[in-house]
């Protein structure tokens, strides 16, 4: 093996492998670990890349050359792609070391749940569909893992696991080589334990530089959503505690009672999800119906429930809502909203997506901040949301929020 010009890269791989050996029999974050390939890649590191020596887990709906791509489905047992998905190739080009594949809800959609456990309580879910990626970062196996979100599959697990999760604006990261679920919703995102690394990943993917903040304090909208009555008592206490701490830290907090069309967006999201999901799984329903989970046959049959007129209405209202949202938050630096209704539930279910789906449909960037705890010390996160394509600006705002909260003694959990 060639000696690395950046020995820390090899050390990073050994640390990751040791933590996986110590914990993954319980956490079950990984479906495949390529220790030999990771060490070989680390040996080629020269320390010059933005992500040089950073070990990465990849959700197993994303192609990695030479590694199994199962989608957690019996339909893809034994399938090994020859090429990286562009999102993976971009990370490699920045010096990242791809360690392996993480568990996922079947096709990042429905059907079989991931086997992964929440590292904070092994009886509870890490959330889905990006279960293994969230668990791997939360349990210290890797500092970075790729995720995807079609409803709430990046942000909700981040909340449940007490880590930073970032869902970029729709379309900014290539989805080539990633299993399609709903073409107008699917977004590649990632998990980290700190926002500095999150921002470096944004830079690697070519996101625009943040602008300089204006004079005066940051202005943060506080939006409890139309489903506030479905938030658990500890979820409410966590959210209100974060909002109060942000005000104490000198941020200008502005209540938002309503947003344009927002109360309709979950229903519109479902119509689009099922109709685009029908297109995504039609071939498997026709060619391999016996091995395709019943959940996906329901999507293929969605035309009866969501006719063309309903699909058109959903897309049109979503387009209007995007413009309306960005007008409504003019003058604000971000919007604070719940990431989940409460702590991670028992079992392995993905969790309630209601608090995430509207932002996904709006194509907005979202970052989960791991700022609170609920029952039993379990994590509860909050979301910061911004206008489309203000991705690095949102991360910069999030970093400022965390720095200010640290000054008043509220330090992010596990950060």
Image (spheres, rainbow, N blue to C red):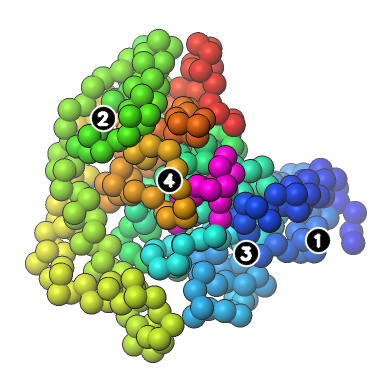
Q: Residue furthest bottom?
A: 287
On residue 223, the disc is: 2
Residue 190: % across, % down: 52, 48
Query: Looking at the image, which is closer to me, 359 or 304?
Result: 304
- Name the residue tied to disc 1: 40
**Which comes sooner in the sequence, label 3 or label 2?**
3
**Which comes sooner in the sequence, label 1 or label 3?**
3
Magenta segment: 116-129
Residue displayed at 9% across by 67% down: 309
- Name the residue tied to disc 4: 345
Give the alpha-carbon distance from disc 4 to disc 1, as whole Å: 39 Å
Give the alpha-carbon distance from disc 4 to disc 3, as whole Å: 23 Å
In the image, residue 315 sits, relative to residue 198, either above or below, namely below
- Name the residue tied to disc 3: 31
Residue 237: % across, % down: 36, 24
Contact check, label 4 and label 1, Cβ < 8 Å: no
Q: Quadrant of residue 291?
A: bottom left
Give the alpha-carbon distance from disc 2 to disc 1, as whole Å: 48 Å
Residue 267: % across, % down: 18, 54
Q: Quadrant of residue 355?
A: top left
Left or right, 12 with reference to 386: right
| Quarter that holds the N terminus | bottom right
**Which comes sooner in the sequence, label 4 or label 2?**
2
Crowd band around label 1 with a 10 angstrom C-alpha radius: few (<14), some (14–19), many (20+): some
In the image, residue 361 sits, relative to residue 62, either above or below, namely above
Circle 4 SS class:
loop
| Residue 284 appearing in the image | yes
Crowd band around label 3 with a 10 angstrom C-alpha radius: few (<14), some (14–19), many (20+): many
**Which comes sooner in the sequence, label 2 or label 1?**
1
Left or right, 306 with reference to 184: left
Is residue 256 inside the magenta stretch? no
> Which of label 3 and label 2 is nearer to you?
3
């Amino acid at each position: 093996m060639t000696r690395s010009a950046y020995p820390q890269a090899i050390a990073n791989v050994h640390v990751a492998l040791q933590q996986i050996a110590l914990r993954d029999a319980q956490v079950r974050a990984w479906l495949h670990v390529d220790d030999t390939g990771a060490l070989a890649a680390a040996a080629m590191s020269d320390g010059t890349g933005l992500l040089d020596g950073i070990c990465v887990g990849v959700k197993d709906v994303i192609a990695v050359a030479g590694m199994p791509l199962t989608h957690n489905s019996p339909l893809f047992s034994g399938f090994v792609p020859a090429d990286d998905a562009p999102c993976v190739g971009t990370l490699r080009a920045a010096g990242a070391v791809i360690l392996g594949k993480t568990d996922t809800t079947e096709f990042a959609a429905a059907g079989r749940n991931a086997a992964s456990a929440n590292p904070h309580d092994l009886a509870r879910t890490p959330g889905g569909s990006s279960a293994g990626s969230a668990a791997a970062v939360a349990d210290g196996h890797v500092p970075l893992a790729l995720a995807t979100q079609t409803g709430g599959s990046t942000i909700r697990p981040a909340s449940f696991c007490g880590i930073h999760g970032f869902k970029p604006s729709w379309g900014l990261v290539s989805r080539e080589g990633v299993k399609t679920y709903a073409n107008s919703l699917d977004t590649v995102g990632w998990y980290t334990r700190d926002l500095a690394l999150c921002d470096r990943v944004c830079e690697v993917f070519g996101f625009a530089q943040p602008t300089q903040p204006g004079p005066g304090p940051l202005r943060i909208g506080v939006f409890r959503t139309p489903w506030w009555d479905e938030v658990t008592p500890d979820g409410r206490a966590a959210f209100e505690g974060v909002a109060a701490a942000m005000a104490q830290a000198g941020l200008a907090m502005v209540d938002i009672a309503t947003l344009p069309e927002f109360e309709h967006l979950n229903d519109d999201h479902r119509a689009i999800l099922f109709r685009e999901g029908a297109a995504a799984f039609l071939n498997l329903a026709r060619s391999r119906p016996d091995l395709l989970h019943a959940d996906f046959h329901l999507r293929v049959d969605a035309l009866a429930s969501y006719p063309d007129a309903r699909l058109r209405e959903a897309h049109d209202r979503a387009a209007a809502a995007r413009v309306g949202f960005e007008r409504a938050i003019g003058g604000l630096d971000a919007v604070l909203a719940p990431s989940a209704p409460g702590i991670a539930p028992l079992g392995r279910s993905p969790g309630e997506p209601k608090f995430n789906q509207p932002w996904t449909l709006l194509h907005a960037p979202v970052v989960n901040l791991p700022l609170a705890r609920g029952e039993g010390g379990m994590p509860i996160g909050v979301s910061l949301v911004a206008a489309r394509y203000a991705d690095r600006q949102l991360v910069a705002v999030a970093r400022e929020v965390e720095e200010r909260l640290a000054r008043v003694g509220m330090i992010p959990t596990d950060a």
